[in-house]
Image (tube, coloured by chain):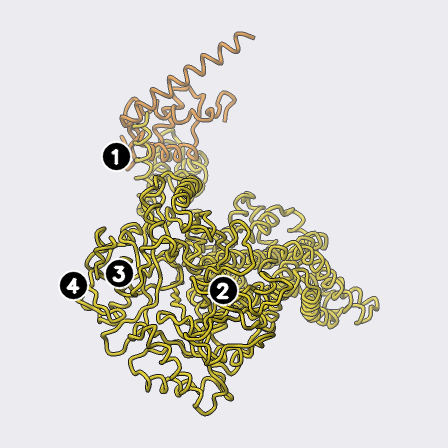
């Protein structure tokens, strides 16, 4: 892990995955690559975190999955956002923004 | 928001269900996804220019451990805990199978402890908690009683009073009254004595009992003038006497030779309002005149009804009690002369301690037995806890390895608790099997008697539920200590030092010693209780009841259903006496309207010459109607004056005999002979004083009794009991007595033909129940304590094998080694005895009221129980001590 990389903050993994899936359906590897890409290499999602999270979010009903074929004609499981997932993403984003705002204000104040 | 939450729950529930049911498919799916993911990774690496083997390694490094990832996914899915639970259970099952001896001992110990509780509970459930089987919402029902309820069990109310209370009350949704009476079912091949009730018309409706055939009484059938000859018969009568005839409703049957139209059949389980006592059929009380020729419902001064009321919803017992007392005071003010002799204070009781039926007696004894059973269970738990602890020490390495491999403390505790839960539930299952048998055992305590006893003890849902709860509780109590201990092992030292860690053993044995002390002290408590009950029962049975019970045969009949009247009855009784006294082997014979110690003595309101009752004093006094030669036959000596003879007839002066207690109470220091007592308007002159005899119970204080001669106070409706003193075995006379009576009247049912020594067992019923159960609990407790102390001493001796070997190698004598081990056990025993004695002194104070003739700190009981336990402990320690002396030092030292 290079010095610029960091672990995701507790509780934000779900939000980041949902965000990644916002653009369209994607398989597991695609999701982790997408997160690396959009965070410009800051976040690395390990398989040991990614798969349990995907599993949990499926059970919450935020995402759904189906087997499909990759660009290179390989079998892969594809995940997509559900309506509940879209709503969840919006809620978490709003919440996150409030937190960020709050923290920045606190830091500026001192 | 709520909708969303609901959706999320639904989604999780669906996943849960899928995870539980589609286990196999799910596993395949996870595996497929993981391998697909790896393939994609490898492909990516290849594309970036790596060589195939390089690419594969890099992919695996990036992915991490395949199995770990799978496991993490499994943990994330809904219901993951179920998997863990199943795994722990499988492991627990394997452990218990691996060690069948240990499992059997633990399960049996727990089973006995739990079964003791569930047995008592099944009785409580069948009596105190189910006071009127078949009735609806019995918790809203209360009994209404009058005066000091502990003294006299006669019905408290007159019909006009019940009617007025019932019409005036706002707190009750209804009040019912009934009178229990023995009757004869006539007009059938063999007339039979049955137990009927004369009831108010609202009886069935208020209880919420719906006949399975026909209907209950209509309101107009209860009104006095219209007295309808209708009857509701019980299920048993319907089955036994009418073969379950489906057309029975509308048919006519005969009670006391009077025709009744059957209007309904009561449900199977409904047997009247007196817990433990059976009612066979029900008649509106307006029929009193037709059947018995008396007009009891008309008089406010005639008390003959038991009363139960149903509280309106939301009304408390205290509110109802206040209101009904107010109503009663108004009635008393209007009719002072009808209420002057007795207490007019009314008290309400919930049915679990109803004065009508057995609950009034059981509600004190059964909770006490439950307390003893709880002590036994605690003891069993202590025993199991020490067994588990001993075993957990043997499993130290296993636990240390698991902790070392990264198992959390929580997981170890959970594993241990699940193991003990499994043992607890096995114990509970065995306990239910035992209880199926023991719950019926109370029946064995009831002697044959004239009381219509019913037994309905069985395992119901309530008992089952509590059994399961108690099993779990017992498992937790006995499992939690070993679990906590084992999970806090110092892993390093255990793995390094193997089993030689002496410090650890000693550390643990302190806890073990504590458990042994607890076991010995608890078993001392139980044994002391058992000893006190047994001695108290012995004292009661040895006590002089004031009559001689051996060689006496009893047999009863009732004349009025057979058509005898006040005029013809005495002649029949005389014939009976003449014929029976002529039989060979008969020493003397007499008649009485009761028999001792079978709850059959009656009482009357008396006015006593020269005695002014205290305000509110209850002047209802035990009254016995007895034939000539009663005192001679019963061998109750007449202290002064004379006893009744053939010459005391309706034509001679009315006479009476009183007992010594009567004289002491009402005419202390005076000569009773010649004084007068008024009963129901008739004045009886006292001609004799008899010594005291116990008629209600062997253990209650002697109470005043008045005896009236049979021919002067003859009532055809009373049960007449023949008392026959024989020279040989009274049982052998039974056929001759029955033959003689049937020669005189073939239609007359003769019932309850038994020796007095058998029927009077009813008087010691509760004492025998208490002694038997406390006794078996005590013996069990002693056995458990013996096993406990043996286990701990044997175990710690084995732990000290090396030490003992060194001692022997250094020249210790065998005797010294023996004492060394024995000392350890005896120190524990002594500590247990001291703690136990203190506990027992505190505990037995609660039993004081149930004891007779022994003090609750009876020195003999305490000493002998202490000695007994000491001897048992000595024997239990002897075995491991002797084994220790046989230790071969060479083997012991090489051993580890």
Looking at the rendered structure, the secondary structure element under dot 1 is strand
Q: Are marks 1 and 4 in contact (CB under 8 Å)?
A: no
Q: Position of residue B88 (x, y in %)?
A: 47, 51
- Element under disc 4: loop
- Give a yes or no on whether discs 2 and 4 share a subunit: yes
Q: Is residue B100 visible?
A: no
Colour displayed for chain B in the image of the structure: yellow
Q: Which residue is mark 3?
A: B287
Q: Say the numbered circle drawn on residue B250.
A: 4
Residues beneath discs 1 and 2 located on the same chain = no
Q: Which chain is orange?
A: A
| Spatial separation of the CA atoms under disc 2 and disc 4 | 43 Å
- Residue drawn 39% across the image and 72% down it: B714
Q: Residues within 10 Å of mark 3 (few under 14, many from 20)?
A: many
Mark 1 vs mark 4, CA separation in Å? 84 Å
Callout in the foreground (4, 3): 3
- Mark 2 vs mark 4, foreground winner is 2
Marked residue chain, label 3: B
Distance (Cα) linking label 1 and label 2: 100 Å
Q: CA distance from mark 3 to mark 2?
A: 28 Å
Give the foreground label among 1 and 3.
3
């Amino acid at each position: 892990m290079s010095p610029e990389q960091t672990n995701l903050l507790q509780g934000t993994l779900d939000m980041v995955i949902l965000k990644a899936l916002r653009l369209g359906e994607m398989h597991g590897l695609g999701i982790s690559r997408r997160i690396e890409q959009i965070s410009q290499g800051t976040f690395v999602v390990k398989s040991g975190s990614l798969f349990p999270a995907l599993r949990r979010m499926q059970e919450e009903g935020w995402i759904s999955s189906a087997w499909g074929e990759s660009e290179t004609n390989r079998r892969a499981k594809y995940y997509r956002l559900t309506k509940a997932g879209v709503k969840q993403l919006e809620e978490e984003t709003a919440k996150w923004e409030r937190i960020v705002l709050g923290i920045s204000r606190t830091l500026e104040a001192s | 928001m709520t909708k969303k939450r609901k959706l999320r729950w639904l989604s999780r529930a669906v996943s849960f269900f899928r995870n539980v049911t589609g286990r196999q498919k799910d596993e395949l799916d996870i595996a497929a996804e993981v391998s697909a993911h790896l393939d994609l990774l490898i492909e990516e690496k290849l594309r970036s220019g790596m060589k195939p083997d390089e690419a594969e390694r890099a992919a695996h490094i990036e992915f991490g451990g395949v199995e770990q990832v799978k496991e993490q996914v499994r943990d994330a899915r809904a219901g993951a805990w179920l998997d863990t639970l199943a795994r722990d259970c499988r492991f627990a099952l394997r452990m218990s199978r691996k060690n069948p001896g240990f499992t059997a001992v633990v399960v049996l110990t727990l089973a006995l402890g739990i079964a003791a509780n569930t047995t008592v509970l099944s009785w409580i459930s069948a009596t105190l908690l189910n006071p009127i089987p078949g009735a609806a919402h019995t918790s809203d029902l209360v009994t209404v009683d009058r005066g000091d309820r502990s003294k006299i069990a006669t019905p408290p109310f007159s019909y006009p009073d019940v009617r007025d209370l019932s019409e005036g009350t706002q707190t009750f949704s209804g009040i019912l009254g009934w009178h229990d009476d023995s009757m004869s079912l006539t007009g059938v091949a063999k007339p039979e004595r049955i137990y009927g009730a004369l009831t108010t018309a609202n009886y069935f409706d208020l209880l919420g009992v719906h006949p399975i055939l026909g209907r209950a009484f209509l309101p107009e059938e209860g009104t006095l003038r219209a007295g309808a000859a209708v009857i509701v018969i019980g299920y048993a009568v319907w089955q036994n006497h009418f073969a379950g005839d489906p057309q029975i409703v509308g048919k006519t049957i005969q009670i006391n030779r009077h025709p009744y139209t059957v209007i309904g059949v009561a449900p199977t389980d409904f047997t009247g309002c007196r817990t433990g006592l059976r009612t066979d059929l029900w008649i509106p009380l307006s029929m009193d005149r037709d059947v018995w020729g008396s007009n009891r419902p008309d008089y406010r001064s005639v008390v003959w009804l038991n009363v139960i009321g149903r509280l309106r919803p939301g009304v408390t017992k205290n509110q109802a009690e206040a209101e009904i007392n107010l109503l009663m005071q108004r009635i008393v003010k209007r009719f002072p002369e009808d209420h002057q002799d007795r207490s007019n204070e009314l008290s309400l009781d919930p049915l679990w301690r109803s004065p009508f039926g057995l609950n009034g007696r059981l509600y004190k004894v059964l909770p006490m037995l439950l307390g003893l059973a709880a002590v036994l269970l605690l003891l069993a738990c202590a025993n199991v806890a020490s067994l588990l602890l001993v075993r957990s020490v043997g499993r130290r390495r296993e636990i240390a390895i698991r902790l070392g491999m990264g198992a959390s403390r929580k997981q170890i505790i959970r594993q241990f608790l699940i193991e003990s839960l499994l043992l607890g539930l096995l114990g509970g299952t065995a306990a239910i099997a035992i209880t199926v048998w023991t719950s019926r055992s109370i029946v064995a305590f009831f002697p044959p008697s004239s009381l219509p006893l019913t037994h309905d003890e069985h395992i119901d849902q309530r008992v089952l539920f509590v059994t399961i709860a108690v099993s779990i509780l017992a498992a937790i109590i006995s499992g939690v200590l070993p679990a906590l201990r084992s999970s806090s092992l110092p892993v390093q030292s255990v793995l390094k030092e193997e089993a030689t860690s002496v410090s650890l053993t000693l550390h643990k044995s302190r806890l073990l010693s504590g458990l042994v002390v607890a076991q010995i002290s608890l078993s001392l408590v139980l044994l002391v209780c058992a000893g006190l009950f047994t001695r108290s029962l012995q004292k009661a049975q040895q006590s002089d009841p004031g009559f001689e019970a051996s060689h006496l045969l009893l047999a009863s009949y009732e004349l009025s259903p057979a058509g005898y009247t006040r005029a013809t009855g005495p002649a029949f009784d005389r014939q009976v006496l003449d014929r029976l006294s002529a039989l060979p082997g008969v020493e003397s014979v007499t008649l009485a309207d009761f028999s001792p110690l079978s709850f059959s003595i009656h009482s009357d309101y008396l006015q006593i010459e020269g005695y002014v009752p205290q305000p509110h004093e209850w002047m209802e006094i035990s009254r016995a109607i007895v034939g000539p030669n009663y005192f001679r036959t019963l061998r109750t000596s007449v202290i002064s004056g004379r006893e009744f003879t053939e010459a005391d007839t309706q034509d001679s002066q009315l006479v009476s005999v009183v007992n010594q207690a009567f004289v002491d109470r009402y005419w202390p220091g005076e000569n009773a002979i010649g004084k007068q007592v008024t009963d129901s308007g008739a004045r009886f002159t006292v001609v004799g004083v008899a010594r005291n005899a116990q008629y209600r119970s062997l253990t209650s204080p002697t109470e005043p009794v008045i005896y009236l001669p049979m021919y002067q106070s003859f009532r055809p409706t009373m049960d007449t009991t023949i008392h026959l003193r024989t020279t040989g075995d009274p049982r052998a006379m039974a056929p001759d007595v029955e033959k003689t009576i049937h020669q005189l009247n073939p239609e007359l049912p003769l019932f309850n033909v038994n020796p007095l020594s058998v029927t009077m067992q009813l008087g010691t019923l509760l004492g025998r129940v208490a002694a038997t159960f406390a006794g078996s609990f005590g013996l069990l407790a002693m056995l458990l304590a013996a096993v406990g102390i043996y286990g701990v001493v044997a175990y710690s001796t084995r732990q000290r094998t090396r030490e003992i070997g060194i001692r022997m190698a250094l020249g210790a004598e065998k005797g010294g080694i023996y004492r060394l081990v024995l000392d350890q056990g005896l120190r524990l025993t002594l500590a247990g005895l001291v703690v136990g004695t203190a506990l027992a002194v505190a505990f037995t104070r609660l039993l004081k009221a149930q004891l007779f003739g022994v003090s609750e700190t009876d020195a003999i009981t305490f000493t002998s129980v202490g000695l007994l336990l000491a001897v048992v402990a000595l024997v239990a320690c002897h075995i491991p001590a002797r084994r220790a002396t046989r230790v071969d030092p060479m083997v012991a030292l090489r051993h580890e």
